[in-house]
Image (cartoon, rainbow, N blue to C red):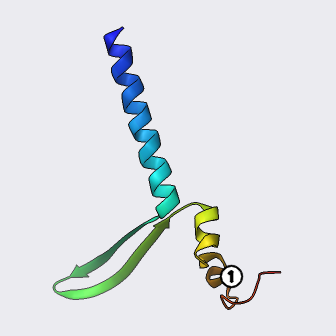
Amino acid sequence: MAADDGIDDEELVLGDLLNHVLDKGVVISGNVTISIADIDLLVVDLRLLLTSVESSLRRGLGQSMLGAPSSEQPR
């Protein structure tokens, strides 16, 4: 029975973490460069936004992603 209690606690912690991440949002960014002989062949700038739809709309991110000014409501 003690092992089951540990699993339940881990699931609760993971659930709380996921809830917090989706509520607040997380941005992950990085750069990837492919080069040969010190000549850059490909440079990629990566940015990942992980958040819930409700949180992004609350902060006005939904309108900016659709290309509408943040003061206007999307149609």
Q: Look at 50% across and 49% down and name the residue there.
A: 19
Residue found at the very far left of the displayed protein:
37
Q: Look at 77% across and 81% down and name the residue there.
A: 74
Q: Look at 45% across and 69% down and name the residue there.
A: 48
Query: Relative to residue 23, is residue 42 drawn left or right?
Result: left
In what quadrant of the picture does the C terminus appear? bottom right
In the rendered view, tell whether residue 10 sits above or below residue 72.
above
- Say which of 7 and 45 sits in front: 7
Q: Look at 61% across and 79% down and name the residue there.
A: 60
- Say which of 34 and 36 sits in front: 34
- Say which of 74 and 44 sits in front: 74
Q: Which residue is mark 1?
A: 66
Q: Dot 1 lies on which element?
A: helix
> Within 10 angstroms of label 1, few (less than 14), some, or many (20 or more) residues?
few
Residue found at the very far right of the displayed protein:
75
Query: Relative to residue 39, is residue 42 drawn left or right?
Result: right
In the rendered view, tell whether residue 68 sits above or below residue 46.
below
* Residue 14 screen position, x and y as percent: 41, 40
* Residue 43 screen position, x and y as percent: 34, 83
Query: Relative to residue 49, is residue 39 drawn left or right?
Result: left
Image-quadrant location for residue 58: bottom right
In the rendered view, tell whether residue 41 sits above or below residue 11.
below
* Residue 23 screen position, x and y as percent: 52, 58
In what quadrant of the picture does the N terminus appear? top left
Task: Please name the amino acid that badge 1 sits on.
Answer: Leu
Query: Relative to residue 39, is residue 12 drawn left or right?
Result: right
